[in-house]
Amino acid sequence: YFFISHAEFAQMIEENELIEYAYVYNDYKGIPKAQVREALASGQDVIMRLDVQGAATIRRLCPDAVLIFLTTRDEEELVRRLRARQTETDENFNLRIAMARKELLRIKEFDYVVVNAEHCLDETVETIRGIVNTEHHRVHHRKVTL
């Protein structure tokens, strides 16, 4: 993550320096084009943390991008985790749960789904590594450019 002022963010929007951006959970979030282009040009895999809006934008810009939907086992687990973090106001908490329900309806827009089960982070990481490895071994490689 990079933290910049609202003025700097607005300037990046104005100068078309972001792949995508959104106002999410009362804050602006975006992905700078330069960093992604540099990584792709050097042959690196690029992993982005996106919401479904961002994933849809990436799919439109890079149809061959691999999209992974990361979720909890169920809504109850999500509720437990958010409550345990104690970082959300009641309003934001309810907004996040409502948003998670809406996002789950768009799961078919993704290539893979990975369940990030509580206390199973290592397994989740290995599953994602396996997906990346599988994609590297495709007969017909996906060409991702930006």
Image (cartoon, rainbow, N blue to C red):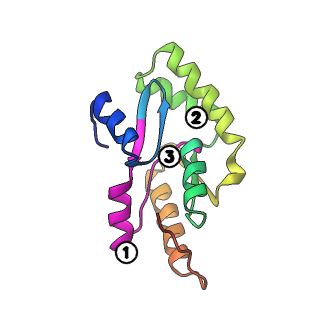
Instruction: Tell me the residue that label 1 is attached to.
Output: 43
- Which tag, 1 or 3, sits closer to the chain's start? 1
Residue bounds of the magenta highlight: 29-52
Name the residue that disc number 2 marks.
77
In 3D space, how far apart are the residues under numbered discs 1 and 2 (Cα atoms)?
Answer: 37 Å
**Residue 96 in the image: x percent, y percent?**
56, 27
CA neighbours of label 1 inside 10 A, class few (<14), some (14 to 19), many (20+): few
Identity, as a three-letter code, of the amino acid under mark 1: Gly
Mark 3 and mark 2 lie on one chain; the one further toward the N terminus is: 3
**Which numbered disc, 3 or 2, marks the residue closer to the eye?**
3
Where residue 79 is drawn, which disc sits there? none
Q: How far, Cα to Cα, is label 1 from label 3?
A: 21 Å
Residue drawn at the location 28% of the way across and 36% of the way down? 3
Distance Cα–Cα, label 3 vs label 2: 20 Å
Quadrant for the N terminus in the image: top left
Q: Residue at x 49, y 31 (%)?
A: 24
* Disc number placed over residue 50 in the picture, else none: 3
- Quadrant location of residue 94? top right
Answer with left or right where residue 62 lies relative to residue 41.
right
Residue for point 56% across, 79% down: 141
Q: State yes or no: discs 1 and 3 in contact (Cβ < 8 Å).
A: no
Pick whichever, 71 or 84, lies toward us.
71
Instruction: Estimate how packed mark 2 is, as few (under 14), some (14 to 19) or many (20 or more) residues with alpha carbons within 10 Å.
Output: some
Kind of residue at badge 3? Leu
The residue type indicated by label 2 comes to Glu
Position of 129 relative to 55 (above/below): below
